[in-house]
């Protein structure tokens, strides 16, 4: 099945099974805003717990905070967001549709990649096992021609971005003959900068209200609190502050479901280090974070680092962890060495000293910062897209199964009486009443057992327990594994021991410590 179709199916699966709904659904939705349903919120909470515990439980020198969404507007002036948190936008004069100029060019780059990949796929089919892909890529005339055009475009594009040259961005769009996907015309406006921050007014207009912003990242709440936390928590550099919270960006191009949203959630950790040691910690955090991702078991080939060609003026190293989504490798997390830029800016704009006194060096300095920043929603999408599976079974039937890591699954165990009588429902309820304190259980007695298994497969429940007549005599049940569909007979008294370990976030954390 084409990856595009897989993605469409995933989006409808998310709605059908209560993972993600379009916001304001009965009013036909609101662009790039989504709600999480009864299953989605459980998965999301588990992702957040996995991240939070990996930060604050596994590291003695990391603590958490929860700062307000509204912050003093000068914070965004100091951080550079008021002046520079922009995307270059361009309008098509015929369709009146607005696009991000950089995204139009990135799509064009992807078209060259597609052309190359198609040539490779065609040749692979033609030559069969004897096919040498590396040799084909380095010698085939058509591939080399596409590759040369792609490289030239990439170089020109990177330079235009680096120079902040909006005219050149437009010229690239014109030269590459990029057409509006709606009108099909190349009738473009100039490229303009568009600030992504949402603003609102605080206070009544009568006594002079203040324009404030909805935070576009949670990080600034950490920076402006770093000394409060350091002093009250008696933290010594190096130390980290973690935070999970909502962020808002007025994205021009909102697409790919929950990949790019206008209201989303971030999990950010700022790690404060001595000046000069930042690159060593940058390397360390790259390793720690990749291990966290890989522990979920989707396969190492699903991840790659993408080092930034263009560094923000305040950063001295930056990389993304990309995940193989149905629409290609995409950024899920950013790891940035942000120098002492943010703290120095806040010191300058607030007029207050926020230097750290290092008792070991007997000197004061502004710490350097390594940031790890991951979107909860993007992580959610990456997990769902890797877990979604359509399987053909031996008996000719098919099933849709979410192969979620057990520790993240919304429901851990479904308990089902084989029939709705003879005391089986009561026995099933008794089992749930004992286990519900340990993990999320569901009771289901409707339809055939096969249909009930399918429903649980579709929401990713790792284990199902069936209570039958034999259970009333021997206190044993059938335990079914979601992925292998194998069944084993186990004693009810053993259920907690068998399952708890396999589905707990603690077990997952033990693999990465
Ligand atoms: N404090 C650094 C920062 O915010 P970023 O690369 O702009 O860096 C970090 O964002 C992460 O937040 C991204 O890797 C992505 O997972 C998530 N993110 C950013 N914009 C998003 C959006 N519009 N919708 C969903 N997630 C987003």
Image: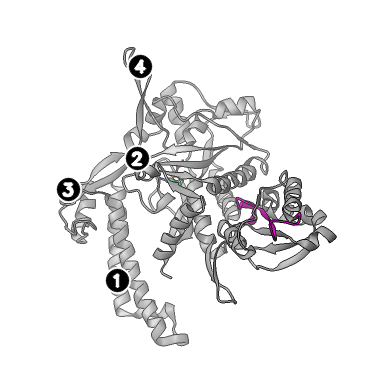
**Residue 335 visible in the current orientation:** no
Q: Which of the two discs, 2 and 1, sits closer to the camera? A: 2
Q: Could you tell me which residue is drawn at 39 percent across and 86 percent down?
A: 126
Please state which of residues 421 and 108 is positioned toward the viewer in this rendering: 421
The secondary structure type at the circle numbered 4 is loop
Q: Is residue 418 magenta?
A: yes
Q: Name the residue carrying label 3.
A: 189
Q: Which of the two discs, 2 and 4, sits closer to the camera? A: 4
Badge 3 or badge 2: first in the primary sequence: 3
Ligand 1 image position (quadrant): top left
The secondary structure type at the circle numbered 2 is loop
The alpha-carbon separation of the residues under discs 1 and 4 comes to: 59 Å
Badge 1 or badge 4: first in the primary sequence: 1
Q: Residue furthest right?
A: 474
The CB of the residue at mark 3 lies under 8 Å from ligand 1 = no
Q: What range is drawn magenta here?
A: 405-423
The alpha-carbon separation of the residues under discs 3 and 1 comes to: 28 Å
Q: Residue 355: x and y, percent?
A: 53, 27
Would you say 341 lies left or right of 146 here? right
Would you say 180 lies left or right of 345 here? left
The alpha-carbon separation of the residues under discs 3 and 2 comes to: 20 Å
Q: Residues within 10 Å of mark 2 (few under 14, many from 20)?
A: some
Q: Name the residue carrying label 1.
A: 146
Q: Could you tell me which residue is drawn at 64 percent across and 43 percent down?
A: 53
The secondary structure type at the circle numbered 1 is helix
Number of on-image labels: 4
Q: Residue 374: x and y, percent?
A: 50, 46
Badge 2 or badge 4: first in the primary sequence: 4
| Tag of residue 250 | 2
Q: Residue furthest front?
A: 422
- Picture quadrant of residue 200: top left
């Amino acid at each position: 099945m084409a990856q595009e179709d897989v993605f469409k199916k995933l989006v409808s699966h998310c709605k059908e099974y209560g993972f993600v709904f379009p916001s304001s659904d009965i009013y036909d939705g609101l662009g790039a805003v989504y709600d999480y349903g009864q299953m989605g919120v459980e998965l999301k909470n588990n992702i957040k717990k996995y991240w939070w515990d990996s930060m604050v439980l596994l590291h003695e020198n990391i603590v958490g905070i929860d700062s307000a969404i509204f912050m003093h507007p000068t914070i965004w002036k100091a951080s550079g967001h008021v002046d520079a948190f922009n995307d270059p936008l361009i309008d098509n004069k015929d369709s009146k549709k607005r696009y991000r100029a950089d995204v139009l060019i990135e799509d064009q780059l992807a078209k060259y990649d597609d052309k190359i990949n198609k040539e490779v796929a065609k040749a692979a089919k033609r030559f069969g096992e004897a096919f040498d892909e590396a040799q084909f890529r380095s010698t085939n005339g058509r591939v080399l021609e596409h590759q040369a055009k792609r490289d030239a475009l990439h170089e020109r594009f990177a330079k235009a971005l680096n120079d902040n040259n909006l005219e050149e961005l437009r010229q690239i769009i014109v030269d590459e003959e990029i057409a509006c996907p709606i009108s099909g015309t190349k009738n473009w406006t100039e490229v303009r900068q568009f600030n992504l921050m949402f603003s609102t007014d605080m206070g009544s207009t009568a006594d002079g209200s203040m324009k404030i912003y909805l935070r576009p990242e949670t990080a600034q709440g950490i920076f402006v609190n770093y000394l409060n936390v350091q002093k009250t928590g008696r933290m010594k550099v190096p130390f980290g502050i973690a935070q999970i919270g909502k962020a808002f960006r007025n994205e021009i191009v909102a697409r790919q479901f929950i990949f790019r949203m206008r209201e989303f959630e971030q999990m950010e950790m700022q790690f404060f280090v001595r000046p000069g040691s930042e690159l060593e910690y940058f390397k360390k955090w790259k390793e720690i974070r990749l291990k966290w991702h890989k522990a979920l078991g989707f396969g190492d080939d699903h991840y790659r680092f993408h080092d930034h060609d263009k560094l923000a003026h305040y950063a001295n190293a930056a990389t993304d962890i990309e995940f193989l989504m149905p629409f290609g490798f995409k950024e899920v997390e950013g790891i940035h060495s942000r120098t002492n830029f943010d703290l120095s800016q806040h010191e300058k704009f607030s007029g207050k000293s926020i230097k750290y006194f290092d008792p070991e060096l007997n000197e004061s300095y502004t710490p350097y910062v390594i940031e790890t920043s991951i979107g909860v929603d993007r992580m959610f999408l990456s997990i769902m897209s890797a877990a979604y599976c359509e399987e053909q079974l031996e008996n000719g039937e098919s099933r849709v199964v979410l192969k979620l890591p057990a520790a993240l699954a919304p429901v851990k165990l479904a308990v089902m009486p084989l029939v709705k009588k003879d005391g089986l429902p009561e026995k099933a309820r008794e089992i749930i009443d004992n286990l519900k304190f340990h993990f999320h259980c569901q009771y289901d007695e409707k339809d055939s057992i096969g249909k009930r298994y399918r429903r649980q497969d579709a929401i990713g429940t790792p284990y199902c327990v069936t209570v039958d007549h034999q259970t009333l005599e021997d206190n044993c049940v059938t335990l079914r594994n979601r992925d292998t569909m194998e069944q084993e007979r186990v004693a009810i008294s053993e259920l907690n021991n068998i399952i708890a370990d396999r589905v707990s976030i603690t077990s997952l954390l033990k693999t990465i410590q």
